Image (cartoon, helix red, strand yellow):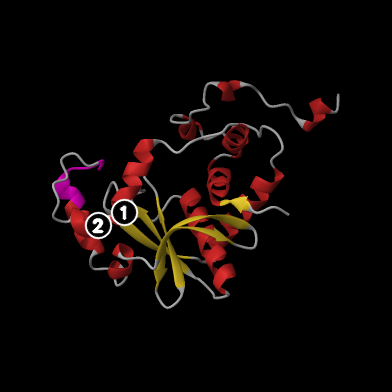
Amino acid sequence: MSKVPFSELTTAAYCPRKLYYQRRDDIEIPELVVERRQLAFEYDELLDADLTNRPIAISPAEFRSNLERVTDFDAWSVLVSPADHNRLTDGKDCRGIVHKVLDLGTPVPSMVFTGTPPEHGVWEPQSVRAVAAAKALSWEHERTVERAFVEYPVYGIVREIRLGTRRKAAYRRALRTARAIDGPRPRLKNKSKCKECEYRAECGVKTRSLRSLLGR
């Protein structure tokens, strides 16, 4: 069975119908996303840099305040100088780019996201991607990986997560969903997810049920 890309697992956890459309199209990473991700590799410099023209989402003072809290992490030194970065990693069931590989006794992934963080913790699709990265590193290194980091560089925020039962279950659900998609899935009931979706215009087309496809 083919390995599912990290990006597809993220989308499957967010909206399976969107994943169908993404597979149909050839999507390039926007330049702004690339610029925002780069912030995650410049934390040391950003603490004292002029942030006026940098792609941050909050005021320079708030950004520095957030980032200064990250300096208290025991992982700060490896967050700014990871053992490896942007590494294509193959796991048993999934594969993709691990943005940072941190040497913390075991190889720990740190995944970079350019959107807005929740008030606490991380969004479930991002948790799924972090678990996928951890499992891929675990498979490659034949070592157990039980934690990961999630970075929101445009806010200067980094959060550590433990890969407990709930997060692993969400990952397995996303994996099953991604493998099962062979056509448009039913639309989400949670319409708030649709506001910023690039497919919201064409997503208005109703999906056909199995009953209708069988002519019943």
Residue beneath label 2, please? 43
Image quarter (top left, top right, bottom left or bottom right) of the N terminus: bottom right
Task: Tell me if mark 1 has few (under 14), some (14-19) or many (20+) residues whose alpha carbon lies within 10 angstroms of its own.
Answer: many
Q: Is residue 65 left or right of residue 30?
A: left
Residue 36: percent from left, percent from top: 32, 44
- Is residue 180 visible from the viewing direction of this image? yes
Q: Is residue 65 left or right of residue 184?
A: left
Q: Are marks 1 and 2 in contact (CB under 8 Å)?
A: yes
Marks 1 and 2, Cα distance to the nearest angstrom? 6 Å
Q: Secondary structure at mark 2?
A: helix
Marker disc for residue 207: none
How many numbered circles are shown?
Answer: 2
Name the foreground residue: 154 vs 206.
Answer: 154
Amino acid type for the residue under numbered disc 1? Ala
Region in magenta:
55-63
Q: Secondary structure at mark 1?
A: helix
- Is residue 120 visible from the viewing direction of this image? no
Residue 114: percent from left, percent from top: 36, 45
Residue at image position (19%, 39%) is 53
Amino acid type for the residue under numbered disc 2? Tyr
Residue 180: percent from left, percent from top: 71, 45
Residue beneath label 1, please? 40
Residue at image position (36%, 65%) is 82
Question: Is residue 198 located in the magenta-colored stretch of the structure?
Answer: no
Residue 132: percent from left, percent from top: 54, 58
